[in-house]
Image (cartoon, rainbow, N blue to C red):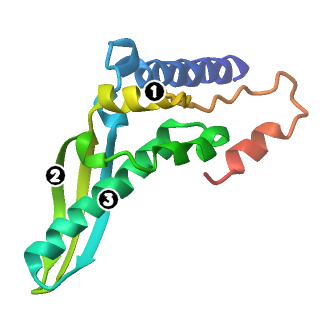
Amino acid sequence: MARFLGEKRGLLQAVLLALAGAAGLPAAAGAAPSQDKVFTIGNYPVEARAADAVTAKDRAIADGQQAAFRSLLKRLVPVTAYRRLDALRDTRAADLIEGFAVRSERNSSTEYIASYDFSFQPDGVRRVLDQAGIPYVDRQAEPAALVPVYRAPRHRGSRAGALFRGARF
C-alpha cells in the first residue's frame, strides 16, 4: 500500500511539472510581447458636446488623444517622476499619434460618445521623453505562470495532507 501511494505521489508531481513546463512554452518558443502594445492605450472613452455632431466628434477625438497620451506617459514613467511630466504639458498628442481604431461609438445631433484604441509612435514618444530628461520604461514584463506544488510530509503523524486535501480553491 505504501509503495502504491508513493507511486501515486510521484505521478502527481510529474503531471504538475509537465503542466509547469507547458505553461512556460510560449515564452520559451520566442513569443515576445509586441512593443507596439506598450504604446497603445486601448478602449479609451471619449465624449464631447458641441453645436453639431461633426464638431462634437472632432473635439472628442482631439481631447481623447491628449488624455490617452497623458495615460501613456503615466504607464511609461515611474511614479517618482510624475511631477516632471508637467514639462510635457504643451506637447501635442496629435503629432505623436500613429493611428486609432473605433471600438464603439454613439452620437446624437450635438453629442458624441465613443471608445477608441489610440496607438502612439514609439520613437516619437521616446524622443519627447529623452529631450525632457524624464526616465521611462518601455518594455512590458514577460508573462509568468505560478503553479502550486504539494509535497506530502514524510512522516505519518502530520495533518498537513488532510488540510491541503480539504482546502477549497
Residue at x-position 61% and y-position 17%: 10
Q: Is residue 135 above or below residue 91?
A: above
Estimate the spatial distance between the alpha carbons at disc 2 and disc 3, rounded to whole Å.
Answer: 10 Å
Circle 2 sits in a helix, a strand or a loop, which is it? Answer: strand
Q: Residue furthest top?
A: 29
The answer to whether marks 1 and 3 mark residues whose Cβ atoms lie closer than 8 Å is no
Look at the image and tell me whether residue 121 can be seen: yes
Measure how far apart labels 2 and 1 are at the Cα level.
29 Å
SS category of the residue bearing label 1: helix
Tell me which amino acid carries mark 3.
Tyr
- Residue wearing tag 3: 44
- The three-letter code of the residue at mark 1 reads Gln
Where is residue 73? Give x, y as percent: 46, 43
Please tell me in which quadrant of the rendered image residue 140 appears: top left
Residue for point 81% across, 26% down: 153
Distance of label 1 from label 3 (alpha carbons) = 27 Å
Residue at the spot of label 1: 131
Q: Earlier in the sequence, mark 2 or mark 3?
A: 3
Q: Observer-nearest residue: 17 or 117?
A: 117
**Residue on which the image places disc 2:** 101
Residue 36 point in image, percent of width and height: 29, 31
SS class, disc 3: strand
Which mark, residue 164?
none
Q: Mark 2 and 1 residues: CB-CB less than 8 Å, in contact? A: no
* Quarter in which the N terminus is drawn: top right
